[in-house]
Amino acid sequence: VMKGIEMTNRDPKVQTQIWEEAIKELYNTFGYEMKPLENMGGKKGDYMLANKFQDASNEQDQHMELSEEEYENQSLLLIVLSVIYMNGGAAKQDQLYAFLTRSGLYDPKDNQNNVKQLIEDKFKKIHYIKIEKDDASDADSGTKMLYKWGLRAEVEIKKSDILKFVANIYNKTVEEFTEEYKEIIEKEGEDCFKEP
C-alpha cells in the first residue's frame, strides 16, 4: 500500500498514521474492516477486508440488491456454516452432504448440480470454508475431507446469527441449545441475542 502511494521512504510514524487513518475511513465510509490475519493463521502483514455493513432486515429498506443466484448462494453458505457449527466446528464430508441431500439441496447423482463445486471451489477460494483431510476417516473408504469455517467466515459471520437461524429452523429458542448458547455469550457478550 505504501509503495502504491509513494510513501515507502517516509518516516514509519507517518506511514503508521496514514495506515490507521485509511483503515478508519474504509470502515466509516464503506463498512469494511481491515482485519489482520496474523493471529488467525495468516502471515504477518496479511489482511482481509471484512464486510461489517449490516443491511436492513426489511427488504424495502435494503441498500444491497442481490441477484437470485447470489441470494441462493448466500442461503447455501448459511446452511453449510450452520451444519459445520452445530457439529462442533467441523463437519465430516459424509455428514455435510448427507444433510444437504436430506434437505433436497444436493443430489449426488445429478452431474449438473453445482452445489458441491460451489462449496469446494468458490466458498473455499474466498475463505468461507476450509477443507482439510480427515485423518480419522476409514482408510478403506478412500480419502475423506473435513469442513470447517474459513477465515472470512470467522471474521464476517457472528455465531449468534447462526444459532438464531438454527433455532428458527427447528422452532426452538437459542437457550435450548445450551452448550452453543453459553459459548456464544462468553465470546460475543450478554447482549448478542437481543434484537436491535
Image (spheres, helix red, strand yellow):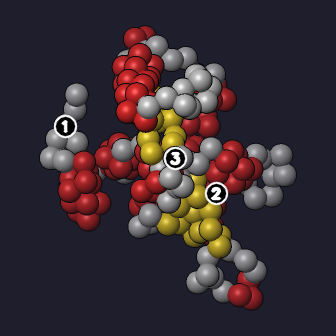
Looking at the rendered structure, the secondary structure element under dot 1 is loop
Which of the two discs, 1 and 2, labels the residue nearer the N terminus?
Answer: 2
Question: Which quadrant of the structure image shows residue 182?
Answer: bottom left
Q: Earlier in the sequence, mark 3 or mark 1?
A: 3
In front of the other: 21 or 156:
21
- Residue 105 appears in the rendering: no
Residue 17 lies in what quarter of the image?
top left
In the image, residue 146 above or below residue 83 = below
List the residue tagged with mark 1. 194
Q: Amino acid at mark 1?
A: Lys
Q: Tag 3's secondary structure?
A: loop
At x 77%, y 47%, the residue is 113
Give x and y (percent) for residue 55. 40, 22
Which residue was labeled with disc 2? 101
Residue at 52 percent across and 40 percent down: it is 48
Mark 3 lies on residue: 45
- What quarter of the picture does the N terminus occupy? top right
